[in-house]
Image (tube, grey):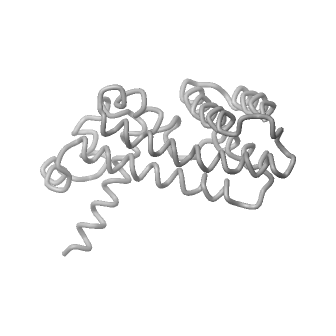
């Protein structure tokens, strides 16, 4: 009996992630979650303590789904500038069939200012991405691709902020040419 519930939980978390990503925490009603997951209201509340609990699980799922490829890219064998160019390109392209924007950015704006636990989770997520990007930049500096006089941590913050800004711009309607221009301009900082 545990297997079907686990499958239902994973499927529900994935479906809730997409709903929250698209509409935000406050903008996603319990009925929206029922529709997205295919579960009834009582099943949602029997499986998850509350809407916030489901949101946190969905956000953690989103973080794992997004950070895995980023870390893999940053630890891979490409030159550092190509790693950053690829990261920017991912922001330009988005994901077909997925909402635009970024669930992490949405949560930072919507929840972090008044939810200490959520703010701590988001800071940890940022730290993980920052470390991966900074390490790649430092490798690029040692290889002579990136000016070693530049502050690697400041550049990593800049790269992450640029990706976040591109996701916001894309959600706001910026077209591909505008996003490509942002990425090309940002690469000149390296």
- Extreme residue in the right direction: 144
Question: Is 120 left, or right, of 6 in this rendering?
Answer: right
Q: Quadrant of the N terminus?
A: bottom left
Question: Is 131 left, or right, of 38 in this rendering?
Answer: right
What residue lies at 63% left-to-right and 25% top-to-bottom? 174
Between 181 and 112, which is closer to the camera in this rendering?
112
Q: Quadrant of residue 190?
A: top right
x and y percentages locating residue 122 in the rendered image: 42, 40
x and y percentages locating residue 116 in the rendered image: 30, 34
The mark total stands at 0
What residue lies at 65% left-to-right and 46% top-to-bottom? 133
x and y percentages locating residue 37 in the rendered image: 29, 51
What residue lies at 71% left-to-right and 35% top-to-bottom? 151
What residue lies at 26% left-to-right and 74% top-to-bottom? 3
Between 158 and 66, which is closer to the camera in this rendering?
158
**Looking at the image, residue 66 lies above or below residue 99:** below
Question: Is 148 left, or right, of 8 in this rendering?
Answer: right
x and y percentages locating residue 165 in the rendered image: 59, 28
């Amino acid at each position: 009996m545990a297997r079907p519930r686990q499958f239902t939980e994973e499927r529900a978390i994935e479906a809730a992630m997409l709903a929250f990503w698209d509409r935000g925490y406050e903008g996603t009603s319990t009925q929206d979650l029922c529709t997205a997951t295919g579960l009834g209201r009582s099943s949602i509340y029997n499986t998850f303590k509350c809407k916030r609990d489901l949101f946190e699980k969905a956000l953690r799922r989103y973080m794992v789904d997004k950070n895995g490829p980023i870390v893999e890219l940053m630890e891979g064998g490409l030159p550092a500038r190509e790693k950053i160019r690829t990261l920017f390109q991912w922001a330009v392209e988005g994901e077909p069939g997925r909402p635009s924007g970024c669930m992490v950015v949405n949560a930072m704006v919507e929840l972090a200012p008044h939810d200490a636990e959520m703010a701590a989770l988001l800071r940890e997520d940022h730290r993980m991405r920052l470390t991966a990007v900074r390490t790649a930049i430092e490798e690029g500096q040692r290889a002579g691709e990136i000016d070693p006089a530049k502050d690697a941590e400041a550049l990593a913050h800049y790269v992450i902020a640029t990706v976040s800004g591109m996701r916001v711009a894309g959600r706001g309607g910026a077209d591909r040419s505008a996003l490509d221009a942002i990425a090309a301009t940002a690469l000149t900082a390296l």
